[in-house]
C-alpha cells in the first residue's frame, strides 16, 4: 500500500470541532482498494478502527484514539444522465454544487452540509425538506463481517430519520461509494417542501424554483445559523446540530404538551410535525431555548452558538471535556423542564454523554 501513515497523529485538525487527542496511527487512503486493505489489516490484527471522512460529525475524547484512524480521502464524481456516483471521500457540498451546475434536482437543498459523501447514507443526512434517502439508489460498501464488497439497494438500507442500517450496525459496513438518481426538471428544483425555504424564496410550499436559487437560499439560511464552515467564525467550530429532534408517541406528546402549558402558560403549543404511525416530531432547538439555554449560552471555552441553539461550539481553546460538560448541562436542563431526554447526533469516540 502506498498510503500515507502517521504515528501519534493529531485528530483534532480532522474534525470540524477541532477537538480530540491523537490516534496511535493515522492512515490516509485515496482509493477504494486502499480503504479495504486498511480495514482488512485492522480487522485481521484486532486493532480498533476509527473511520474519518469530513470529520463534521465526530466528537473525539481528549485522550484520543488507541488504534488505527483511517481517513477516507477517495475521489470520484461520475454523472451519467441523471445517475450520480460519488466516492465516499468526495466533499459533499462541492458535489451538490456540481449537480446544480449540471441542472439536476434532488439534493440542492442539502447544500452547505459539511462532511463527505460517504457519511450521507449513514446519517440519512437531511435538511430543508430533503433527505438523501429519497435519491440514493444503492450504497457500495465493504462488509467487515463477510469480508467482501457488497451493493446495498435503497430498500435494504433501512432509512429513517437521521438513521440507517449503517448507523444501526456501525462496526459492520465501510461505505465506499454512493449512487443517486436525480431528476432533470429543466433547471428547476425539486418541489420546495420546507416552509422556511419557501418563505425565503417567496414561493408556496410545493413550488419549484431555479436550482441555483434553491441552493443559494439554503446556503444563506445555513450561514445565518452558523451552519456553513468558516475558519474565522467560531460559531461554525461545531458538528452542526448537536441533538436530534425528539420523536414522541402520541401519548408522550400529550404529556409533553401538558408540561409545556404548565411551565409556559395555557395555550402555548410546542412545535409538532407528523412523524408517521402515531408519532410526532418536536423541535430540539425550541426545547433548548425554552429551557433557558439561549443563543450564546455559556461562559467557558465551549458555548452554544450565537446563531443557533442546536449547535454547541468550540470558542477556540475548548477541550472535549468542556464540550461534554455543556452538552450534559443542556440535556439535564431540558429533561428537568420538559421530561424529554435529548440524544446527541454526532458520533462519540471514547466518550459519552
Image (tube, helix red, strand yellow):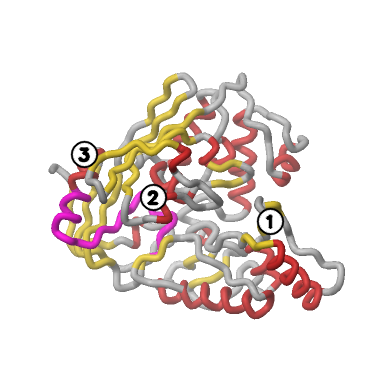
Residue named by callout 1: 278
Residue 198's quadrant in the figure?
A: top right
Residue at 74 percent of width and 38 percent of height: 205
Q: Is residue 14 left or right of residue 146?
A: right
State how far apart marks 2 and 1 are (Cα).
36 Å
Q: Nearer the viewer, mark 2 or mark 1?
A: 1
Task: Let me know if residue 42 is in the magenta part.
Answer: yes
Outermost right residue: 267
Quadrant in the picture for the N terminus: top left
Specify which label sits upstream in the sequence, 3 or 1: 3
Q: Give residue 69's position: percent from left, percent from top.
A: 26, 57
Residue at 24%, 44% in the rendered image? 35
User: What residue does disc 3 label?
Assistant: 33
254 and 233: which is toward the camera: 254
Instruction: Give the CA distance from mark 3 to mark 1.
Output: 45 Å
**Residue where numbered disc 2 is placed:** 54
The residue range painted magenta reads 38-59
Q: Position of residue 102 (x, y in %)?
A: 51, 23
Mark 2 or mark 1, earlier in chain = 2
Q: Image point 52% across, 62% down: which residue?
A: 242
Task: Look at discs 2 and 3 and give the one toward the viewer.
Answer: 3
CB under 8 Å between discs 2 and 3 = no
Amino acid at each position: 500500500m502506498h498510503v500515507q501513515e502517521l504515528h501519534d497523529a493529531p485528530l483534532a485538525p480532522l474534525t470540524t470541532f477541532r477537538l480530540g487527542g491523537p490516534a496511535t496511527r493515522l492512515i490516509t487512503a485515496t482509493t477504494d482498494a486502499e480503504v479495504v486493505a486498511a480495514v482488512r489489516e485492522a480487522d485481521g490484527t484486532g486493532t480498533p478502527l476509527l473511520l474519518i471522512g469530513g470529520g463534521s460529525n465526530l466528537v473525539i475524547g481528549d485522550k484520543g484514539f488507541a488504534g488505527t484512524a483511517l481517513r477516507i480521502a477517495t475521489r470520484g464524481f461520475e454523472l451519467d444522465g441523471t445517475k450520480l456516483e460519488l466516492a465516499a471521500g468526495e466533499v459533499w457540498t462541492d458535489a451538490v454544487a456540481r449537480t446544480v451546475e449540471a441542472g439536476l434536482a434532488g439534493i440542492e437543498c442539502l447544500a452547505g452540509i459539511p462532511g463527505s459523501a460517504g457519511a450521507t447514507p449513514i446519517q440519512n443526512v437531511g435538511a430543508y425538506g430533503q433527505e438523501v434517502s429519497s435519491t440514493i439508489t444503492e450504497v457500495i460498501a465493504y462488509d467487515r463481517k463477510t469480508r467482501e464488497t457488497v451493493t446495498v439497494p435503497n430498500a435494504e438500507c433501512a432509512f429513517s430519520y437521521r438513521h440507517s442500517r449503517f448507523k444501526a450496525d456501525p462496526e459492520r459496513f465501510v461505505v465506499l461509494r454512493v449512487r443517486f438518481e436525480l431528476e432533470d426538471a429543466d433547471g428547476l428544483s425539486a418541489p420546495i417542501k420546507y416552509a422556511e425555504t419557501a418563505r425565503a424564496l417567496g414561493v408556496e410550499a410545493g413550488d419549484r424554483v431555479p436550482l441555483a436559487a434553491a441552493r443559494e437560499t439554503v446556503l444563506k439560511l445555513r450561514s445565518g445559523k452558523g451552519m456553513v464552515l468558516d475558519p474565522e467564525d467560531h460559531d461554525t467550530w461545531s458538528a452542526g446540530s448537536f441533538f436530534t429532534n425528539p420523536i414522541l408517541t402520541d401519548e408522550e406528546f400529550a404529556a409533553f404538551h401538558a408540561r409545556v402549558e404548565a411551565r409556559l402558560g395555557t395555550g402555548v403549543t410546542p412545535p409538532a410535525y407528523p412523524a408517521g404511525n402515531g408519532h410526532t416530531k418536536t423541535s430540539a432547538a425550541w426545547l433548548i431555548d425554552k429551557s433557558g439555554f439561549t443563543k450564546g449560552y455559556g461562559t467557558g471555552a465551549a458555548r452554544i452558538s450565537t446563531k443557533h441553539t442546536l449547535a454547541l461550539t468550540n470558542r477556540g481553546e475548548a477541550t472535549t471535556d468542556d464540550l461534554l460538560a455543556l452538552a450534559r448541562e443542556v440535556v439535564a436542563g431540558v429533561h428537568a423542564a420538559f421530561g424529554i431526554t435529548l440524544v446527541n447526533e454526532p458520533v462519540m469516540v471514547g466518550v459519552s454523554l
